[in-house]
Image: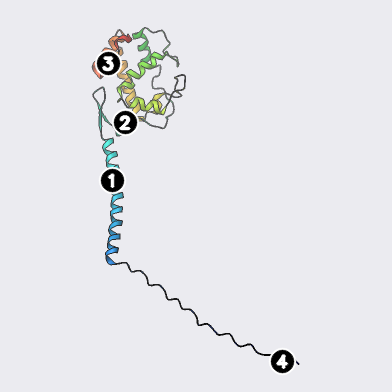
Amino acid sequence: MKNYTESPAEPVQPPVVVSPKPKAEVSKKSQEQQALLGQMLIQGADYLAKTAKQVRLKREQEVIELRSGFKITIGEINAIVSANRLPYAPLFPNSIPFFSELKRLSGLDFDPAQFIKPSVVGTWLCEIIYGRFSKEVLPALRAVNPAFTNGVRPHKLFQYLTPEGQAKLEQFRDEAVDLMKTCATMYEFRQKLFQQYAVPYQIETF
């Protein structure tokens, strides 16, 4: 019969107690400094936003004088030119003799009723009509309606005028027609157009 000898009991280790680290106390002065810094950052952001808004408003309120003597602001230019194209509706219909008068005064042989006209007619149109707007309007219209490599634009420039801009174009068109009817030559017409609306012209063109 075997004898069993009991092994001595292992000593029990006392539990290790980890004392929590004391929380770092934020002094009242540090709290005040942090609050002040936060307020400064908020005020700085508000100041920058307010300044940007003031600059934008000031820019929009800058006055530009048209060649006709009429004054306009940058904000009003934005009200004339639109990046969104309007549906096509003829602003130079055959019922209005704008191109017929140009043909009579210039002696140029072309059909006023035809959609395609000599390139010089387009030049005259830009000078006589779009030249009545501020100098920023025509470049803006050309930018939103860029020409193909052959020089032809996909849409009419006036399709990128707002309704207000198109109303002004119709006014300029009608005033040009009324003035052309009083003239015998293109040179006489351009002289009168310059005298009344300050639209420049080149003498060697005629």
Question: Which dot, 3 or 1, sits closer to the camera?
Answer: 1
Mark found first going from the N terminus, 2 or 3: 2
Total residue callouts: 4
Inter-mark Cα distance, 3 to 1 = 45 Å
Amino acid carrying mark 2 in the image = Ile
Inter-mark Cα distance, 4 to 2 = 112 Å
Question: Which dot, 4 or 2, sits closer to the camera?
Answer: 4
Residue placed most toward the observer, 16 or 57: 16
Q: Picture coordinates of residue 9 (x, y %)? A: 59, 87
Question: Which dot, 3 or 4, sits closer to the camera?
Answer: 4
Mark found first going from the N terminus, 2 or 1: 1
Label disc, if present, on residue 77 of the rendered structure: 2
Mark found first going from the N terminus, 3 or 4: 4
SS under mark 1: helix
Inter-mark Cα distance, 2 to 1 = 23 Å
Q: Picture coordinates of residue 190 (x, y %)? A: 29, 13
Residue underneath mark 3: 193
